[in-house]
Amino acid sequence: MNCSRGATRVNILQSVQGLESGTAIFNMTLILHKRNRTASQLLAAILFLLGFAYAQPVSKAITTQIDGRNAILLGTDWYPEQWPEARWEEDLRLMEAAHIKVVRIAEFAWSRMEPSENHFDFEWLERAINLAAKHGIVSVLGTPTAAPPAWLTFKYPDTLRIDEHGRRATHGIRAHGSATSPRYRESCRRIADQMVLRFGHNRNVAGWQIDNEYGYARMSFDDVTKNSFQSWLKAKYKSLDSLNEHWTTSYWSQTYDDWREIPIPGEEAEFHNPGLRLEWNRFVTDTWADYQQNQIDVIRQHADPRQFITGNFMGFFDGFDHYFISRPLTFASWDDYVGTGHLDPVGNGLTHDLVRGFKRENFWVIETQPGAVNWAGVNNFLNKGEVRVMAWQAIGHGADEVGYWQWRSALNGQEQYHGTLVGPDGTPVPLYEEVKTIGSEFAKAESALRGTTPVSEVALLNSYDSRWAIEFQRHSTKYDPVALLKTYCRFLSPLSQSIDVISPDAPLQDYKLVVAPSLNVIPDNLAQHLSEYVRNGGHLVLGPRSGMKDEFNALLPQRQPGFMADALGGRVEQYYALEKDFPVSGAWGEGQVTIWAEQLKTLVPDAEVLLQYGPSNGWLDGQPAALTHKFGKGRITYIGVVLDERLMATAAKWMVDMSGVKPVFGRVPDGVEVCRRVGGGKEVFIVINHTQERQPVRLPRPMTLVLEDGEVSAVDIPAYGVSVLADNNAK
Ligand code: GLA
C-alpha cells in the first residue's frame, strides 16, 4: 500500500527564516503534503506494523453513535442566545415531544460568550445545556469562529479577510475572519479554550463542531497569506530549481529566482500556471486544516475523550481536500440542502456516500432543510412526505443523526425566510408533525440500526487533485467531473444497491469493482496502488481523461493513461472535445458518445476493443473508444468517452456482471431505492419510494418490519413511503 497523500508536518517558521521577508509571518505549523514515494511507503509500513493498516474491519465501533443515547438521533439547531430565557423551556418541551435528542448550539454566539475582550460569560450557555438535558436532549457545542464579534474586528482589522480585489471584509456578515491572521487564530484558540475548560467535562455535552463550513475555504489575499504560501512552497520543493522544473516555468518567462516572486492566484486565477494553481489549492487545504487543528488541539487537551469532534462540510464543495481535513475529526458531518426543486435521490445519495467516504465510516447530517431554504433561486417547499424520505435516505446511506436547521428563525437577521420547525410565534409549523413522525420512527429503529453501517462491493473514486486539475482546464465547458461521477452512480447503484465513494489512495481490496470516471492525476505511486488492486483480482474501470497528469499537474511524458498503460495494454492516441455527438458500437450495443472522445489503441494482442467509433470526424472513424484487458488476476477497462444513457446502462451492467457484483436485495421498481446497513450480526434494509405513486416491492426472503410489526414477504410502499426491514437470516 502506498499513500499519495502522505503528510509531514514542518515548522513553517524554520522555512520562513530563509525568506528574508520583511513582512511578519504568522506562527503556525502547516501540514505539508508530501508526495514523496519513499516517505509515504515508509509511513504506510509503520502504520501497518502498528496495526493501523488502512483496512478497517467493518465491525469496528461506530463513533457516530453516542454511548447511552439512541443509535440514530433526531436533532435541531437551537439558538437560545436569540431568545429570552423564559422561552427556553417551551422550546425544549416542543423538541422533546418531537423526539428531538440533540441540539447543536453556540456556533454563532461568540459575542454572547465573550462580550468584550477576555471577558467570558458561559452562565447562560450552561443553563441552556442543563435545561436541554432535563428534556433528554444532549448538546453539541459549535465553536463560534465563523462569526467573530464586532469588538474584535473593530479593534483588530487585521483579523478580517481581504478579498481578491484587495477589499477588506466588513463586519455583520459571517466567515469574514482571516484564516491566516495570527491574531485571528489566537482569538479563535482562546474562545475554544475557554469553552472547553467550561464544558469539556459536562456530561450533557456530547461533542464539538469546529467553526462552521470553514469560511467556504475563502482565503485572505494579503501579504501574510502570500508569504505563507511562499514558505509552504519552499518547504515542499526545497529549491527553486525543482519548482521551476515541475511547473515548467520557462513557459511565458515565469522562471522564479526568489521565493518572494511567486504570486498567489487571486483575481486572475484562471490565467495562472496549472502547477501553481494545484499547489495553491493544496495550500488552501493545509491552511484550513491548520486553522481547524488550532482549535482541535485545545479541545483535545481539555475535553473528556468521550466528547467527539466534527466539522460541518458542504457535500461536493471543492474548496479544500475533504479527506485531508477530515483526518483529525472523530467523524465527518455535512449540511444537506436541496435548494430549488425537489430531492434528487441519486445526487443526494451520492453526496451522502461521498461524506461517508471522507473517513470511511458513518457520519452526521448535522444540518438539513426543514422544508425550504432562503438562499436558492426559488425557495420552494418540499412536498409533504419528502422531508421524511430525505431523513431516511440519510440513515440508509450511513448517517446516524439528522438535524434540522433551524428550530426557529430569529426575528431579525439574514435568514428570516428560512424553513424552521416552529414559527416566529413559537408554535409548531405544519412540518413539525412530519419531523415528529421521523423522531418516533428513529426511536423505533434504534436497536435494529445500532452498530450497523453500509457495506459496498463497488467503489467510485473521487480525487480532489483530479477534479481541480480538470476544473482548471475543462477543455469543454460541458465536461463536468462531478456530473460524470453522478452519471456512473446513477447507472451502477440500482445494480449494486450500495456504492462507496472514496479517495483513490484508500484500500481497495474489499471491492469487486472500482470505477474512476475522470482520474486525471495519476502519479507513479497511485498507479502502483491501482495496479496492485487489479493484479490481486479487482476490476478497475478508468473513464476519460485518466492518467494524464503527475502530482505537479504537469503532463506525463507518456500518453494516457500514463503509468497505467502497461496494465491496460493500450493507450490514448488523441483526445477530442466534441461539439456534436458521434456514433459508437460494440460489446455494449450501439449509441452515441457526447462531450468527450478519446482515440484509443491496443498495445498488446490480448487487449480487447469493447467499443469502436462509427463515421465521425475522420480521425476517430473505426478507432477504439473503450478497451479492456486482463491483468494479473484482475481486469482493467478504459472508457475514453462520455456515453449516452442507453450505452451507459449496458456498460454498467457489463461492469457489474464482469466483476461478480450482485444487487443486495433484488429488483425493485424504478424510483424505489434500496439501502442496506449491516453490522453486529444484523442486516437492515431501508426501502424508499421516491415516487408519488404506490409501489409494490417483493422481498428476496421474509423480513421483519421495523417500524411496524410482523414478518412480510412483500411490502406495498405508499408515495414518499419508507419501509425499514430487518433480515432475520443475516449472518
Ligand atoms: C448553512 C449554515 C447554516 C445556515 C444554513 C441555511 O448550512 O451552516 O448556518 O445558514 O446554511 O441553509
Image (spheres, helix red, strand yellow):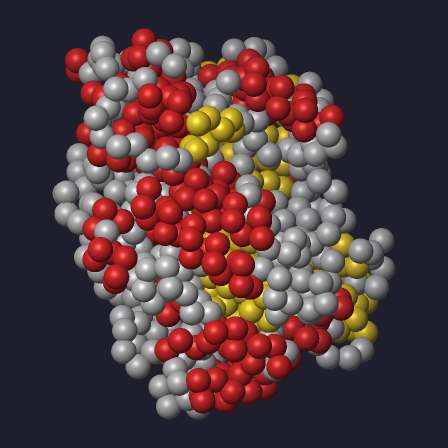
- Quarter of the N terminus within the rendering: top right
- Depth order, front residue of 164/709: 164
Give the residue displayed 42% in from the left and 74% down from the top.
79
**Residue 212 x/y as whole percent:** 41, 57
- Seen in the picture, residue 15 relative to 187 is either above or below; the reply is above
- Residue 259 seen in this snapshot: yes
Give the residue displayed 57% in from the left and 26% down from the top.
3
**Residue 275 x/y as whole percent:** 32, 23
- Residue 376 seen in this snapshot: no
Q: Quadrant of residue 576?
A: top left
Q: Quadrant of residue 242?
A: top left
**Residue 73 x/y as whole percent:** 61, 69
Number of numbered discs present? 0
Residue lying farthest to the front in this orientation: 119
**Residue 500 x/y as whole percent:** 59, 45
Give the residue displayed 61% in from the left and 77% down from the top.
133
- Seen in the picture, residue 68 relative to 551 is either above or below; the reply is below
308 sits to left or right of 146: right
- Depth order, front residue of 700/623: 700
Give the residue displayed 37% in from the left and 59% down from the top.
118
- Depth order, front residue of 551/102: 102
157 sits to left or right of 673: left
